[in-house]
Image (cartoon, rainbow, N blue to C red):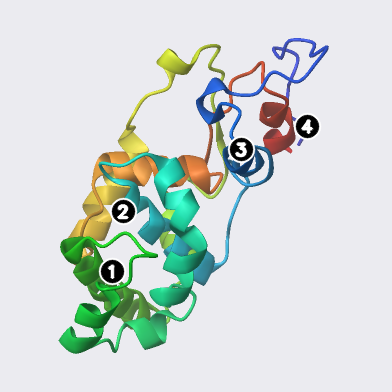
Amino acid sequence: MQLDLSYLPVITEPSRCPWCGTDPQYVAYHDEEWGVPVLDDVLLFEKLILDTFQSGLSWLVVLRKRDAMVKRLQLREPDKLARWTANRIERVLQDATIIRNRTKVEATVNNAKLFVHLQEQGHSFSDLLWGHVNNKTMVNRWKRDDQIPARSPEGDAMSKELKSLGFKWIGPTVCYAFMQAVGMVNDHLVSCPRHRTCCR
């Protein structure tokens, strides 16, 4: 099925979404990752956890510490993270390379346990999450940053389901930011070259 992209303006030169500014790391994230569909269970878990740490902070703060967070918190090894003890949590909270928020770290361990439990029950984390957008990217057509919402009915429903399963720090705004990041929602402005690319 061919998407109708006739509403898109003709781009004569790159006009990125303004939120990434000119910081090289932020621009690279915008150009290479934000809005690109992610389907892998573990990578979705990683990105969801990173979005919980963004709550109350700038995403750039998380981006600066992302590599350390992924490594120190074992976000790509949720089976190991799920077995963390209180002593292990105390040790990692002494590490200045991560965002040292106790309740978020404790929530991360809790969420890893639930993620592992879902996998042990034969459930796909990807199917659970992508099911909230009927397994396809929702394409929005925003012209200005101030049109982009902080939450949506789909994000609200995702938050409600995850909370019902016992996940923590997973509010509606966290879920919507996560959906934008992993390509469940294409919220690039129509003037941004990435809007067209992410439609494909």
Question: Where does label 1 land, which residue?
Answer: 108
How crowded is the residue under tag 1: few (<14 C-alpha within 10 Å), some, or many (20+)? many
Question: Where does label 3 land, which residue?
Answer: 30
Q: Is the residue under label 2 in contact with that under label 1 (CB below 8 Å)? A: yes
Q: In 3D space, how far apart are the residues under numbered discs 4 and 1 (Cα atoms)?
A: 40 Å
Q: Toward which corner of the image does residue 73 lie, by quadrant?
A: bottom left
> Disc 4 vs disc 1: which is toward the camera?
1
Q: In 3D space, how far apart are the residues under numbered discs 4 and 3 (Cα atoms)?
A: 25 Å
Identified at 45% across, 57% down, the residue is: 65
- Three-letter code for the amino acid on which mark 4 is drawn: Gln
Q: In 3D space, how far apart are the residues under numbered discs 1 and 2 (Cα atoms)?
A: 9 Å
Q: In 3D space, how far apart are the residues under numbered discs 2 and 3 (Cα atoms)?
A: 19 Å
Instruction: Indicate which disc, 1 or 2, sits on the residue closer to the N terminus.
Output: 2
Q: Is residue 191 left or right of residue 188?
A: right
Question: Where does label 2 land, which residue?
Answer: 52
Question: Where does label 4 land, which residue?
Answer: 2
Q: Is residue 112 left or right of residue 134?
A: left
Q: Position of residue 83 (x, y in %)?
A: 29, 89
